[in-house]
Amino acid sequence: MIFKNNLAFAQRLDQQDPLHHLRDEFLFPQQNGAPFIYLCGNSLGLQPKSAREYMSRQMDNWENLAVEGWFEGATPWMFYHKELKALMANIVGASAAEVCPMNTLTVNLHLLMVSFYRPTAKRFKIIMEAGAFPSDQYAIESQVRFHGYDPKDAIIEVAPRAGEATLRTEDILDTIATNGAETALVLFGGINYFTGQWYDMPAITKAGHHAGAVVGFDLAHAAGNVPLQLHNWDIDFACWCSYKYQNGGPGGISGIFVHEKHFADTSLDRFAGWWGYQEEQRFKMEKGFTPEMGADGWQVSCTQVIPMSLYHASLKIFEKAGFIAPLRQKSLQLTAYLEYLIQEVNTQLGFEQYKIITPKDLADRGAQLSIVAQHHAKEIFNALVAKNVLGDWREPNVIRLSPVPLYNSFQDVFHAAEYLMAISKDLISPKQ
Ligand SMILES: *Cc1c(COP(=O)(O)O)cnc(C)c1O
């Protein structure tokens, strides 16, 4: 599509957008009496208007049924997670049995590594991306130490080449091939939080399996953002948080994926708890752990009804949208429009003040653009916030903007770039 840098064009795209009305399902934060142009859904998704009601229903159940709420009411808590599983499966490309809402993300990463990082004297290494989200680094380092290895020996990080910001797939695959015989686990982010790079998940999985390793992904920035086929790509396990692109609320519940090929493997270690016990037999309270078949068998503690209710509200909006395929179609255009408008700002300034480090190729990114501001980065970010444009800031000079197809419009993107232009002209003298 040929983009144009004017409001009428952005308005026309909004009129043609079949998902435009979905933004009415969300609450936008305000500043000085006006809503923010919210481009921070990569960090915390907006609150669905329906979330309060979904939560309220469970508060009512608690009020009216108390302990009987586990088995009584419209959505007995004992089985409530099943309603979410069916919806979550559509978000990540899995069967309902392969996913489960539980705990929070880093906790799940640990629990899944207990099952899927099983180092031996010969195979004990983990291959991951350099610059992974810190929580993942800490989790992986501590797991390695827990098994008696030194992270310096056991962790191989794939880094960008000198002068480059993102990873080359060939370098990832080479690293896996070269170290394959010693690698127990390949554990990557789906999309890197800093650069917005979407890794080639099927290729990484194939290479990892070819080397004889287990392959897992942290999908914090990918789930709800890009189309995933976790089952068909033959990924062993994955986890994600619900509060970024999936609007599950601060500290929201996490989701896990375990490929069905592992369901019957009784050799897998687990940190067990009563909620992972065979559902039908759970309340017999017997000695000796027998897991429920499927991802549910990785549950530990009793189900978190209130956080699930918030996630549920948002998943129902995804269902209304037709899940990821239509959202992705809009997202590709929306992000490309933002990219185009940022280049327009550079053109008007006469130099590349804003360098986008997120890959240009649409297959290698989701909704996020990470923008290095060459001059006055922090001042520009603050000035955008003052103009009601909320992105997020990463030291030392990166502004991340994420137009989210569920609730952002082409006009949002247009106005954000318009303010960026005005602010930049104020702070930087154009070079012709
Ligand atoms: C956001 C994010 C987290 C956060 O983990 P929590 O346990 O939910 O606090 C972890 N890993 C990645 C890759 C993230 O993007």
Image: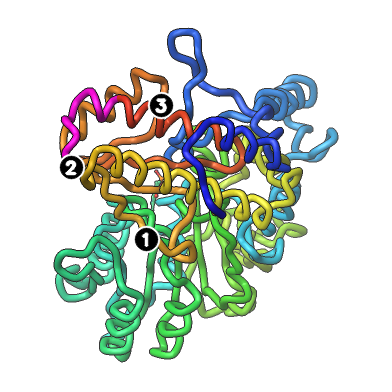
Q: Relative to 304, is 428 on the left or the right?
A: left
Whether residue 229 is situated above or below residue 99 in the rendered picture: below
**Marks 2 and 1, the one that precedes in the sequence:** 1
Depth order, front residue of 287/29: 29
**Image-quadrant location for residue 20:** top right
Residue that mark 1 sits on: 359
**Which residue is rendered at x = 61% and y = 45% of the image?**
302
**Which residue is rendered at x = 50% and y = 58% of the image?**
239
Disc 3 crowd rating (10 Å Cα; few below 14, some 14-19, many 20+) is many
**Marks 3 and 2, the one that precedes in the sequence:** 2
Q: Amino acid at mark 1?
A: Pro
Residue that mark 3 sits on: 389
User: Can residue 15 be seen here?
Assistant: yes
Q: Relative to 162, is 49 on the left or the right?
A: right
In the image, residue 425 lies in the stretch drawn in magenta? yes
**Disc on res. 429:** none
**Image-quadrant location for residue 304:** top right
Marks 2 and 1, how far apart at CA: 18 Å
Q: Amino acid at mark 2?
A: Gln
Magenta stretch: give its range.
423-432
Depth order, front residue of 72/116: 116
Residue 63 lies, in percent from the top left, at 73, 20
**Pointer 1 residue Cβ closer than 8 Å to ligand 1:** no
Residue 107 lies, in percent from the top left, at 43, 51
**Pointer 3 residue Cβ closer than 8 Å to ligand 1:** no
Residue that mark 2 sits on: 374
Residue 155 lies, in percent from the top left, at 23, 71
Q: Under tag 1, what secondary structure?
A: loop
